[in-house]
């Protein structure tokens, strides 16, 4: 029996940690070819291997993650596949020999860096040949085993396993990486991945990279249930990476990894280690934990039962949702999509608001039925370029059931999780009064479709959509309705449908909220969903009079109108003062505010936000 497999039958092996993280920390840029360093700067690679061995690693992985013909071609090194891989193995074996320790050397094989059929143009045979070229070089150089890691495409990893079986007799570890929702990039869950890898003939089923130890423990348990007699390899990142001051940082410290080394072992992992963000300190902590804890010491082990697993596997609520549900006071600001292609002003405004402290940017969808850029595209741009969460306004008007559901899937795929369901403005008042104005769902029906359908993993007809969505859903509330009983009835209908929060029309009298809340409580009990009260800053007396006399649902007290009139040319300044005072009063009952900038005066709103924070 191969030495590697023999060891697995008697103990849990400790592998090394990150190579790329350590090289980058030594000043190697991400634009460089890390694999070429085996030849051009072997001392840097050797020192990292040495540190991991001294930390207690029993298995080190060669610096050959990207040493295949496709990735090397980006650096003009496609003809050096064999040389670079051989150098990687030779270097690792020399360090092992110099350490006088019994350490295994694993030949590292990463993704090809290209899409293969049926999702790309590289055919399966071409992929297999590329893997065979690299794996053959690693095996010929004397690697003890082959590790195929950080894969996200089951088609690709199967070709890599086939290539390994064709060119060598070494044990093979096949390891896959997962996204935040415990799925691969192509949507495969841990159960399917484990079964496919087992059927493909891998010796060890692996999971690496992905998120932190907590996620990989959850995935390991699912894999173990899918393949009860399997051998498993686990190498998590040091948490989800964050960019701080231009540097990539990982939050999980060494001691945390030490705790999880035991959890991985007792959940069935034969090999444990670290991936991106981990260092020799992480490996040393894992070594200490494995050496000092007995196999029977499970007092600190908490493994979730299967019935809780699927719920836990879902992604975390949005920061906006967490703030509202924890009782925090949230600040949301509305922005309109641009009328044309340019998003420069929008991005500048969103950046200003985010810097001032806005929790979320609300993106309106065709406000006043005017033609504008699609709202979910704007949400995507803002989230990617500004880094602040958004809330997508989602009108039912003008959408049939097919489009409603397709648009929801599109929004979720773009990373949009907060949605605000409204009826939408009638096309008769907009740019195209003759445009179709039909709809299949009223707002409460759409809320029910999202919360009781999509968030449960099924569409309107009850057909599975593959995995549940994770939408946090808001609905409209009028605090100054012409008929309060009808408004309370509509509010209760939305609550029963599953609404998570409510946004209101502009409020100028802080007592409007308690009035309707008391009416609701008298009929249906206390309203537990948070309300974001609408705040529309005034800029002049003309503006105030227009809103008061011509906009339905908006009532501005006479005292407020006189105050803005008395301010004269200082109307904006007075508007800020009035808004700040109003927000402080709203905090008594509202879960937050929904600020609506007028005339793109984002600087005015930023001043308000900074004053109420």
Image (cartoon, rainbow, N blue to C red):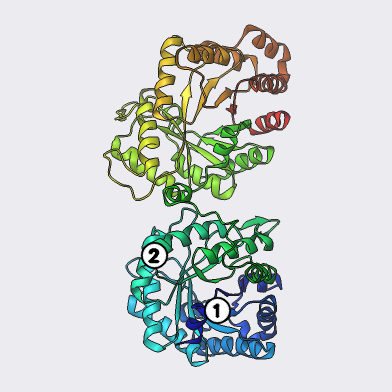
Q: Residue at x 45, y 34 (%)?
A: 365
Q: Which residue is mark 1?
A: 75
Count every numbered label the image shows and give the total.
2
Q: Which mark is first along the chain, 2 or 1?
A: 1
Res. 552 in view: no
Crowding at label 1, few (<14), some or many (≥20) Cα neighbours within 10 Å? few
* 312 over 610 or under it: above or below: below
Q: Which residue is mark 2?
A: 193
Label annotation for residue 572: none
Locate the N terminus and report the quarter of the image it occupies: bottom left
Q: Position of residue 392 (x, y in %)?
A: 47, 37
Locate the C terminus and report the quarter of the image it occupies: top right
Nearest to the observer: residue 467 or residue 6: 6
Q: Position of residue 188 (x, y in %)?
A: 38, 60
Q: Position of residue 163 (x, y in %)?
A: 38, 82
Q: Secondary structure at mark 2?
A: helix
* 430 over 272 or under it: above or below: above
Q: Position of residue 12 (x, y in %)?
A: 55, 73
Nearest to the observer: residue 604 or residue 323: 323
490 to the left or right of 261: left
Q: Residue at x 58, y 18 (%)?
A: 507
Residue 546, by quadrant, is top right
For marks 1 and 2, give the one nearer the viewer. 2
Farthest residue in the front direction? Answer: 296
């Amino acid at each position: 029996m191969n030495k590697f497999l023999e060891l697995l039958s008697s103990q849990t092996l400790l592998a090394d940690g990150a190579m790329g993280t350590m090289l980058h920390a030594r000043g190697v840029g991400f634009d460089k070819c890390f694999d070429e360093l085996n030849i051009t700067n072997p001392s840097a690679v050797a020192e990292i291997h040495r540190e991991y061995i001294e930390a207690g690693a029993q298995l080190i992985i060669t610096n050959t993650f990207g040493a295949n013909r496709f990735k090397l071609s980006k650096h003009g090194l496609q003809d050096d596949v064999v040389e670079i891989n051989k150098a990687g193995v030779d270097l690792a074996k020399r360090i092992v020999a110099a350490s006088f320790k019994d350490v295994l050397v694993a030949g590292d094989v990463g993704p090809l860096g290209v899409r293969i059929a049926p999702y790309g143009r590289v055919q399966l045979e071409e992929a297999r040949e590329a893997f065979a070229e690299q794996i053959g070089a690693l095996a010929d150089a004397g690697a003890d085993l082959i590790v195929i890691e950080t894969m996200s495409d089951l088609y690709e990893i199967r070709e890599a396993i086939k290539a390994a079986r064709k060119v060598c007799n070494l044990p093979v570890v096949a390891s896959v990486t997962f996204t935040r929702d415990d799925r691969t990039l192509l949507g495969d869950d841990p159960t399917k991945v484990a079964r496919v890898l087992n059927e493909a003939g891998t010796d060890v089923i692996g999971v690496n990279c992905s998120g932190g130890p907590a996620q990989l423990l959850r995935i390991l348990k699912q894999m173990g249930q899918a393949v009860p007699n399997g051998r498993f390899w686990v190498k998590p990142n040091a948490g989800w990476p964050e960019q701080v001051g231009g540097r990539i940082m990982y939050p999980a410290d060494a001691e945390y990894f030490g705790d999880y080394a035991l959890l991985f072992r007792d959940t069935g992992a034969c090999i444990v280690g670290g991936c991106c963000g981990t260092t020799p300190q992480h490996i040393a902590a894992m070594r200490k934990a494995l050496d000092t804890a007995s196999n029977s010491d499970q007092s600190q082990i908490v493994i979730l039962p299967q019935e809780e697993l699927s719920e836990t596997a879902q992604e975390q609520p949005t920061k906006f949702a967490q703030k509202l549900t924890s009782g925090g006071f949230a600040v949301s600001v509305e922005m309109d999509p641009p009328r044309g292609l340019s998003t420069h002003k929008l991005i500048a405004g969103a950046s200003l608001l985010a810097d001032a402290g806005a929790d979320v940017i609300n993106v309106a969808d065709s406000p006043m039925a005017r033609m504008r850029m699609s709202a979910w595209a704007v949400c995507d741009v803002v989230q990617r370029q500004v880094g602040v969460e958004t809330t997508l306004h989602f009108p039912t008007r003008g959408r049939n059931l097919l489009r409603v559901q397709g648009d929801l899937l599109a929004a979720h795929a773009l990373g949009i999780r907060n949605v605000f369901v409204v009826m939408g403005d009638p096309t008769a008042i907009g740019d195209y009064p003759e445009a179709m104005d039909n709809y299949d769902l009223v707002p409460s029906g759409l809320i029910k479709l999202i919360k009781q359908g999509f968030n449960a993993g099924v569409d309107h007809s009850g057909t599975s959509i593959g995995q549940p969505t994770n939408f946090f859903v808001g609905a409209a509330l009028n605090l100054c309705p012409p008929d309060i009983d009808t408004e309370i009835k509509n509010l209760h209908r939305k609550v029963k449908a599953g609404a998570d929060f409510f946004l209101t029309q502009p409020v100028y009298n802080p007592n409007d909220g308690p009035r309707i809340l008391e009416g609701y409580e008298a009929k249906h009990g206390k309203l537990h969903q948070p309300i974001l009260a609408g705040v529309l800053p005034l800029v002049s007396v003309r503006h105030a009079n227009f809103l008061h006399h011509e906009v339905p649902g908006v009532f501005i007290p006479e005292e407020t109108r006189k105050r803005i009139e008395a301010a004269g040319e200082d109307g904006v300044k007075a508007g800020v003062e009035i808004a700040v005072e109003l927000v402080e009063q709203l905090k008594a009952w509202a879960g937050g505010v929904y600020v609506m900038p007028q005339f793109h005066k984002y600087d005015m709103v930023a001043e308000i936000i900074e004053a109420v924070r």
